[in-house]
Every structure is written in structure tokens, then in C-alpha cells.
Image (cartoon, rainbow, N blue to C red):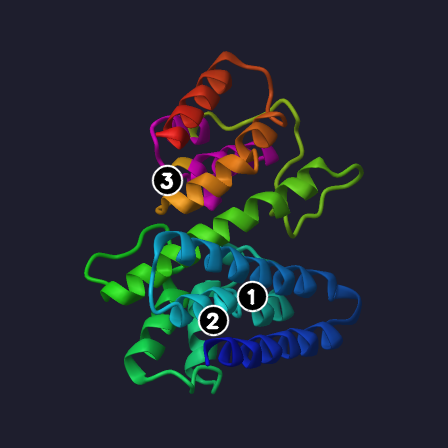
Amino acid sequence: MIPEVLRRMRSRFVGLAGGYAERLGERREHIVLKRDHSLRVHALAARIVAGEGLAPALPFLAASLLHDIGRFPQFERFGTYRDDESVDHGDEGAAFLEGSDLLDCFAGPDRGCIVQAVRMHNKREIPEGMDPLAKSICEVVRDADKLDIVPVVLSKMQAAGPRDPVVTLGLADEPLAWTPSVLEAVVAGGNPSYKDLRCINDFALLLASWGPVLVHRSSRRIFAGRGYLDRLFALLPADPGIGALRADLARRLAA
């Protein structure tokens, strides 16, 4: 039953993305990017759910597939994925799902938890008092989302030629620069805000900070096993403070 439900949902999701891509014509690349990202997050969530023994799996897998559905109308309307310059894509996605029949196969409580997880997956913090199932779904989605964002951004950071400003957020490409307050926040174990990022190296520091704070052990193992920490720090300037941070993040990731 679960595979058939997911097959239908996946087919509808891909078709929906295709409609946006067709309308956007030459700008379709970034719709396809988010479609493919969502499919990979869905697959990563399945690994996390299995590794952590979470059940029933279906609400987790549905939310992971649909978590970025708000990105399609966001990009169509604003041409950016920066929430601070357009709309909050979690809120946009939740509103889209509330007005659609994509989740009609779920009973009321599960449907509400999926919508809530989609709404909150991109927020800086999960609020206290969130429904336990919605919180658990949201934690899986957030972990899987981060695990796929890292290689997507890395591929654009490492590419020769001009940066893709949609993926790298239009940040300044200054190989030797970073923002001291961003470095300090990561050293302190914090999570810098996207709005505080000034250059691409700041983005690399933010991505590196994610590894140790992933909620699930299965997620942290994937982050470590794919070598994301080494790949990110290979892009950063040689500096004693940055080197010390790398060692600390590696220690925390292995804990």
C-alpha cells in the first residue's frame, strides 16, 4: 500500500514540477534543480527513517518529497530562492498543500502534521510545543534537506566559470574573504542566519556547521561518510582560526 501511495504522489509531484518548467522556458533549470533535490531528499529520508526505526514511514516520506513544493511558485514569481528577498518557502509550501488534494490519502491528524512539517522545515528553530509527530517528521526532513543541499551548493562552488547566483545566493565570490561574525557564530556552535552571509566562504562555513547538529545519528554518519567536511574546508582560506574550527567540527561530528 505504501509504495503505491508514494508512486502516485511522486508522479503527481514530477508532473507539477514539469508544468512550472514548461511555463518558465529558458528559466526551467532551477525548477528542475529543486525537483531533483526533492527526489533525493525523499531518498535520504527513507534511509534515515530506516536507520532510526521510525514508523509508520509514510508521513515522513510524503513530507520529504513535498517539503520544497513552495519553491516552484516562489521562483516563478520572484526568480530567486532567497526567502529574505521574496517569500518564506516553507509557508508557501504549506499554503499550497492546504489548498491542494495531494494529501487527501492521509487522515486529518497525519495530514496536518505533514503540512506543519513542511511549514517549519526551513525555520531557524523548531518551536516548543509542536505536535510530537510533526516535530519528528520535521526533524527527518531538515536532516535530509541539509544532507542534499551541501553537495548541490558544493557543485556550484567548485565549478569553473561564473557562479550560479541562484544557488550561491548572489554572494560575493572573494576566495580569501569571510565574515568574522559568521566564523565566530560557527565556532560557538551556533547557526548563522542566511541574511548574515556576505560571501561564498560564509556559505561554506554555514554548511560545515550543519554536520554535528544533525538530529539523527544516521544523518551524521551520511554527512561524515560523504566527506562533506573535508570538501567544504578545502574551499576555505588557510587560516589558523578556520583550521581550528575544522578540527573541532570533525571532533563533534564523530562524537
Give the distance between the C-alpha atoms of the residues marked 1 and 2, in whole angstroms: 7 Å
Reading the image, the residue beneath label 2 is 93
**Front residue of this view, candidates 126 and 39:** 39
In the picture of the structure, the residue carrying the numbered disc 1 is 71
Among the two numbered marks 1 and 2 on one chain, the one whose residue lies closer to the N terminus = 1
Q: Give the CA distance from mark 1 to mark 3.
A: 25 Å
Q: Which amino acid type is marked by label 2?
A: Gly
Q: Which mark is residue 213?
A: 3
At label 1, the amino acid type is Arg
Q: Is 227 drawn above or below residue 93 in the view shown?
A: above
Q: Residue furthest top?
A: 240
Using the image, tell me which numbered label, if any, was put on residue 10: none
Asked if marks 1 and 2 touch (Cβ < 8 Å), the reply is yes
> Does the segment drawn in magenta span residue 155?
no
Task: Estimate the x, y position of residue 52 in percent, counting from the top left.
Answer: 36, 53
Q: CA distance from mark 3 to mark 2?
A: 25 Å
The nearer-to-camera label among 1 and 3 is 3
Q: Earlier in the sequence, mark 3 or mark 2?
A: 2
